[in-house]
Amino acid sequence: MNVERPKEKYDQLIADGYCVIEDVLKAEILTRLRTVTDELLDAQTEDERAAHRSSGSMISVYMDPLFAELVAYRRALQALEALGFLRPKWSSGYVISKPAQSPPLFWHQDWWGWDDPCSYTALPQQLFLMYYLVDTTPYNGCLRVIGGSHLNRHPLHDILPSAHGDALQRVEDPNHPAYQQIHGEVDIPVKAGDLVIGDSRLLHASHGNQSDERRTVITLWYHPFFALLPVSMQAHIGRLRQSFAWSDAEWARIAELAPVCDGDVEPLKWNRNPGPDLK
Ligand SMILES: O=C(O)CCC(=O)C(=O)O
């Protein structure tokens, strides 16, 4: 696959924290992903839905073998390669689906390695690869981001409770600043099958879904420079794998992407809150 202007995309990803690669998923896999995600979503209980009112569903991609195919999807790996990420590893991912007529997703960032000094450098430790399965706009809940917030402190960093608070998920206070429009936020509307790549430290949120259709995204977490990360971080990443519905065939499919950490090292402690070194 040819990525247009790969150096510009790379520069944007490093400086702003995100970029979009158009038209990555072929229609055939897009159709299968829609079918499988719809089945998983239809099987959810009311309690599960209420617990994740703001984000929408949080279903692990280890829950269906099809997602191993997506993790190792050749066109996505070619896109990463075009950006200079030659040996990425992969750790986890979720099906995040906003039902029809649902509230906004709160502002947050997803990085958990803030106790290590490398988290305060330009090196992206972890990237999200987001595939939206329908075209998105602000009306049906497209992504929004604060460019540069992966490297620079923003007032939001100080008002967000913990990165994924239960109360925020349940939308106990819809007037909380974490749901509001923020000066300087950028909308990222996409076509179904485009790929949004972002730094996990980036502050992001999504608009509410005012449409009558569900809006599903699959988020996969990759580590573009796994071999350059501190071993304690590698050890933590190595522990994130789970089994659920995956068999040996799925593990074989993603073998090249498995984050293997040799040696008996204490994994880095999970800390979702950036420290004072984020300036
Ligand atoms: O639902 C979305 O548009 C964004 C999902 C998200 O924030 C995430 O996967 O971290």
Image: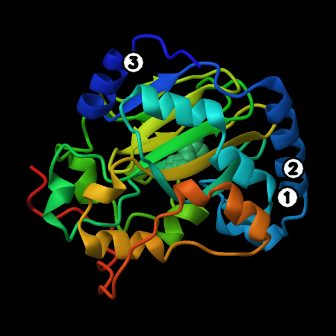
Q: Mark 3 vs mark 1: which is more N-terminal?
A: 3
Q: Quadrant of the N terminus?
A: top right
The residue lying at 21 percent from left, 47 percent from top is 155
Q: Residues within 10 Å of mark 2 (few under 14, many from 20)?
A: some
Which sits in the foreground, 14 or 235? 235
Q: As drawn, is 2 to the left or to the right of 215?
A: left
Q: Residue 238: x, y in percent?
A: 46, 72
Q: Pointer 1 and pointer 2: residues touching (CB < 8 Å)?
A: yes
Determine if residue 157 is in view.
Answer: yes
Q: Label 2 vs label 3: CA separation?
A: 32 Å
Q: Residue 25: x, y in percent?
A: 70, 28
Instruction: Count all numbered tags in the image, as a single digit.
Output: 3
Q: On screen, 65 above or below 151?
A: below
Which element type, helix, strand or loop, lies under badge 3? Answer: helix
Q: Nearer the viewer, mark 1 or mark 2?
A: 2
Q: Answer yes or no: disc 1 within 8 Å of ligand 1.
A: no
Q: As drawn, is 202 to the left or to the right of 32?
A: left
Q: Label 3 vs label 1: CA separation?
A: 35 Å
Residue that badge 1 annotates? 40
Give the amino acid at mark 2: Val
Which element type, helix, strand or loop, lies under badge 2? Answer: helix
Which label sits on residue 6?
3
Q: Nearer the viewer, mark 3 or mark 1?
A: 3
Give the amino acid at mark 1: Leu
Which element type, helix, strand or loop, lies under badge 1? Answer: helix
The residue lying at 66 percent from left, 58 percent from top is 53
Q: Mark 2 vs mark 3: which is more N-terminal?
A: 3
Which label sits on residue 36?
2
Q: Pointer 2 and pointer 3: residues touching (CB < 8 Å)?
A: no
Give the amino acid at mark 3: Pro
